[in-house]
């Protein structure tokens, strides 16, 4: 059988101060959510996380930050990490570096209004990590964030199927878990699974906010 490494396996070979795919912390898992803030779904997810006293990381889209600043304020007030997920959420694959950097720095400027950090952890939209962007971040000693565990919560399947899959194959120690807050699937699954996982001794935290 031919073995083809997954993208996160290849990115995991790079220094973690350039691309973070997982952490070395044997005691923690890191829930991360892309594509918000979403007024219909992010508040319910925040209620779920608060109910179980869990902090997480949210990679936010600049256009949505402008539309829903009150949700970003709540994220910060409740102790979650806010990160950069570009301004428009268009894939970087067909953008030149100048356009990519406009997406990054425009969103940095918006996020800075909420937590005063000059730069934020960055997760490129659709997971596209190109060589030019990597080189730019390396020169500026900034890191990109990927993931080591894909929940597949974006698949067109009922939340019960998501719960079964995550229960049967839970995230491991140090995993950065990819989820989304533009639907109620993550909130529905986590409301069931977090008590089970925490009873098993799992602990969860937000990623450190420093981008460099």
Image (cartoon, rainbow, N blue to C red):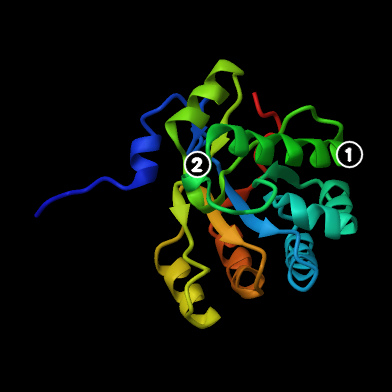
Mark closer to the observer (2, 1) = 1
Can you say whether 42 is above or below 184 in the image?
above
Q: Which residue is mark 2?
A: 174
Q: CA distance from mark 2 to mark 1?
A: 30 Å
> Residue at the spot x=63%, y=34% of the render?
101
Neighbours of disc 2 within 10 Å: few (<14), some (14-19), many (20+): some
Query: Dot 1 lies on which element?
Result: helix
Residue 124 falls in image quadrant = top right
- Could you tell me if residue 28 is visible in this image? yes
The residue at 48%/79% (across/down) is 156
The x, y position of residue 167, in whole percent, is: 46, 69
Say which mark, if any, is on residue 113: 1
| Quadrant position of the C terminus in the picture | top right
> Looking at the image, is mark 2 or mark 1 earlier in the sequence?
1
Outermost residue to the left = 1
Q: Secondary structure at mark 2?
A: loop
Provide residue 210's location: percent of width, then percent of height: 70, 29
**Percent position of residue 20, x then y:** 51, 34
Q: Residue at x 46, y 57 (%)?
A: 150
Q: Tell me the quarter of the picture where residue 36 sits.
A: bottom right
Number of callouts: 2
């Amino acid at each position: 059988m031919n073995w083809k490494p997954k993208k996160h396996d290849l990115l995991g070979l790079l220094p973690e101060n350039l691309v973070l795919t997982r952490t070395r912390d044997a005691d923690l898992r890191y829930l991360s959510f892309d594509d918000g803030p979403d007024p219909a779904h992010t508040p319910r997810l925040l209620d779920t996380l608060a109910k179980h006293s869990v902090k997480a990381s949210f990679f936010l889209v600049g256009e949505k930050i402008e539309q829903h600043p009150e949700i970003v304020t709540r994220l910060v007030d409740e102790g979650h990490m806010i990160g950069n997920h570009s301004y428009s959420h268009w894939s970087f694959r067909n953008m030149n570096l100048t356009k990519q950097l406009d997406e990054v720095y425009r969103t940095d400027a918006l996020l800075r209004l909420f937590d005063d950090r000059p730069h934020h952890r960055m997760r490129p939209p659709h997971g596209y990590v190109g060589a030019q962007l990597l080189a730019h971040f390396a020169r500026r000693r900034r890191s990109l964030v990927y993931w080591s565990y894909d929940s597949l919560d974006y698949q067109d399947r009922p939340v019960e199927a998501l719960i079964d899959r995550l229960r049967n194959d839970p995230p491991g120690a140090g995993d950065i878990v990819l989820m989304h807050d533009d639907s109620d699937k993550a909130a529905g699954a986590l409301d069931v699974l977090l008590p089970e996982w925490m009873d098993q001794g799992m602990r969860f935290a937000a990623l450190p906010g420093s981008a460099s």
